[in-house]
Amino acid sequence: MQLVAAIIVAFLLLTGALFSLIASIGIVRLPDLYSRMHAASKAGTVGSGLLLLAVGVHSQDLPILARALAGFVFFVLTAPISAHLLSRAAHKAGHRLMPPSVRDDLSKGPIEQRSYKMKN
């Protein structure tokens, strides 16, 4: 049983570390604030959550594993929302997209944002 738990912990640690590495590379290499925030919120959330689950499984204690699962769920629910709100605030503050970005829906007015045509 300890071998199975050790294999699961090793898999979670390696996968979480890989996602965290991908997030950090994305933060360094991507061109603008919005792309960097996307990398940090998506890959960073998964990486941190998997590392938290690895700690919970490694403890081999049910209350600690339950807290780790609750922390993982809380982190998965809140990190993308906070990144979205931060990027929206940055856009309103005047931080613009880089030229390779294709589309900026927030720069349009509320009527132009609609993807459908209004019937007359």
Image (cartoon, helix red, strand yellow):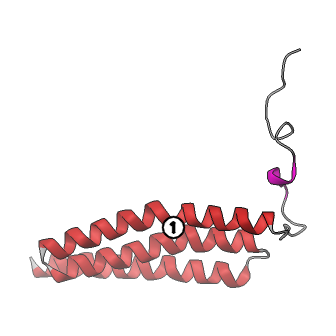
Magenta residues span 102-108
Relative horizontal placement of residue 13, taking residue 38 as reference (left or right): left
Quick check: 114 above or below 21? above
Mark 1, Cα crowd under 10 Å, few <14 / some 14-19 / many 20+, is some
Q: Residue at x 75, y 69 (%)?
A: 90
- Residue for badge 1: 79
* Nearest the eye: 22 or 33: 33
Quick check: 38 above or below 115? below
Q: Position of residue 99 (x, y in %)?
A: 90, 67
Q: Residue at x 25, y 75 (%)?
A: 8
* Nearest the eye: 111 or 51: 111
Q: Residue 30: which quarter of the image?
A: bottom right
Relative horizontal placement of residue 96, taking residue 66 as reference (left or right): right
Quick check: 117 above or below 35? above
Badge 1 amino acid: Ala
Q: Residue 1: which quarter of the image?
A: bottom left
Q: Position of residue 63 (x, y in %)?
A: 15, 72
Q: Residue at x 13, y 71 (%)?
A: 62
Q: Residue 41: which quarter of the image?
A: bottom right
